[in-house]
Amino acid sequence: MTAVDLTSVAERVIAWRRRLHQHPELGFAEHETAALVEDTLRSCGLVSRRVAGTGVVAVLSGASSGKTLLLRADMDALPIPERSGEPWASQIPGLMHACGHDAHTAMLLGAAVWLTAHRNRVAGSLVFAFQPAEEGPGGALPMIEAGVLSSPPVDAAIAMHVLPLLPPGVIGWKTGPVQAAADDFTIEVIGRGGHAASPHLAVDAIPAAAHLVGALQSLGSRESDPLERVVVGIGTMTGGFRRNAVADKVTLEGTVRCFDAALRAGMPQRLQRIAEGVCRAHGATCRIRYDAGYPPVINDPHLTRLAATVVERCPDVAGVVELPAPRMGAEDFAYFAQAVPGCMLRLGVAPEGPGPVAMLHAPEFRLNEAALRAGVAAWCALALELPRML
């Protein structure tokens, strides 16, 4: 693979990323983001179409025969207030690109511009898929239902996600499971209110909920194979009226992350058994809601090894490493990878400077923009070579 001359687009990629970072938008509300994508694609000669509300898709037909490869970037932000300290920090209170989707969108735009200018080197067809709502409620499935994988028929799908734990410009890969399935649950612990001075005349929902938080950890530590990766976490706990009143209700919201299908299928019943048992011991009752979320992302072994080989030959990439383990984060790219052979790669974006690295979804999250050039180069290399190799 010869070096990809990205001088003409590298500065634009950083400018797009900063513009998007300053104007984050939540899932299915990415109106300004989608407009920027459409305008940029139009300016380089690509015809795009809207799908799933704010999703944008464009197809580039190559000069020679080959397979059809879908390149996917997600566009949405998170309801997180930014504390990164960056000059281009979010200008929208309470919203932030804390997961790098602004970088994903900017890099794929850069690749689309470069590849369109070098259409004579492209084989087969490239589908540029800019997806809404990855952070929820999920835009991949609506895009698939709208025909993104069938017009034209897609042979394989690739995604790339930033990772601040990797050095800037390094690409990480792994075959098999790489992102966990993610389910959500809500438990209402229902007691009986009263005065704090007479707790014996009430049923306090707070200690019942506190005991339940600890008891739920046994789902991972004592009810699952120690070799199976599973996370059961409580994200919010709300309830009570004031300091001198017994709370009549506490609401817990949490998540279950795992890879094994049988383990996942049995989680709702196990969670209900533990919740009802703890609440009964405290004289309380409970109501439970369990919502199945994204399935796990499973990287196709053949496609992933081909992708690793391609980016390893790319001079603009700082290095290629096999990742040691899957991550427990969820990704709705899983739906693309269920429908066609799929591969999600990781791009190292570790920021400069000393101190701890802020992870994805943290208000302090920052990324190293110098790594974006490597991401665009990897996209271009994959787009030029994979359609000929599949």
Image (cartoon, rainbow, N blue to C red):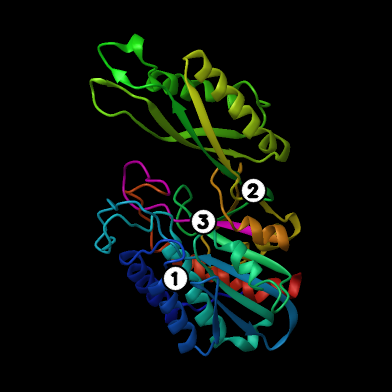
Question: At x 43% / y 64%, what residue is drawn?
Answer: 103
Q: Quadrant of the C terminus?
A: bottom right
Q: Position of residue 4 (x, y in %)?
A: 54, 76
Residue 137 is tagged as 3
Residue 217 visible in the current orientation: no
Q: Viewer-proximal residue, 46 or 388?
A: 46
Q: Are marks 3 and 1 in contact (CB under 8 Å)?
A: no
Q: Viewer-proximal residue, 226 or 279?
A: 279
First-in-chain label (1 vs 2): 1
Q: Position of residue 119 (x, y in %)?
A: 61, 87
Q: Mark 1 or mark 2, which is nearer to you? A: 2
Q: Are marks 1 and 2 in contact (CB under 8 Å)?
A: no
Q: Is residue 301 above or below residue 208?
A: below
Q: Is residue 200 above or below residue 320?
A: above
Q: Callout 1, which amino acid?
A: Ala
Most common secondary structure along the magenta stretch: loop
Local SS, label 2: loop
Magenta span of residues: 343-360
Q: Is residue 19 left or right of residue 380?
A: left
Q: How many marks?
A: 3
Q: Is residue 338 left or right of residue 45?
A: right
Q: CA distance from mark 3 to mark 1?
A: 22 Å
Q: Callout 3, which amino acid?
A: Pro
The quarter of the picture where residue 339 lies is bottom right
Q: Callout 2, which amino acid?
A: Pro
Q: Viewer-proximal residue, 377 or 245?
A: 245
Residue that numbered label 2 is attached to:
296
Q: CA distance from mark 1 to mark 2?
A: 26 Å
Q: Is residue 105 above or below residue 308?
A: below
Question: At x 50% / y 82%, what residue is drawn?
Answer: 113
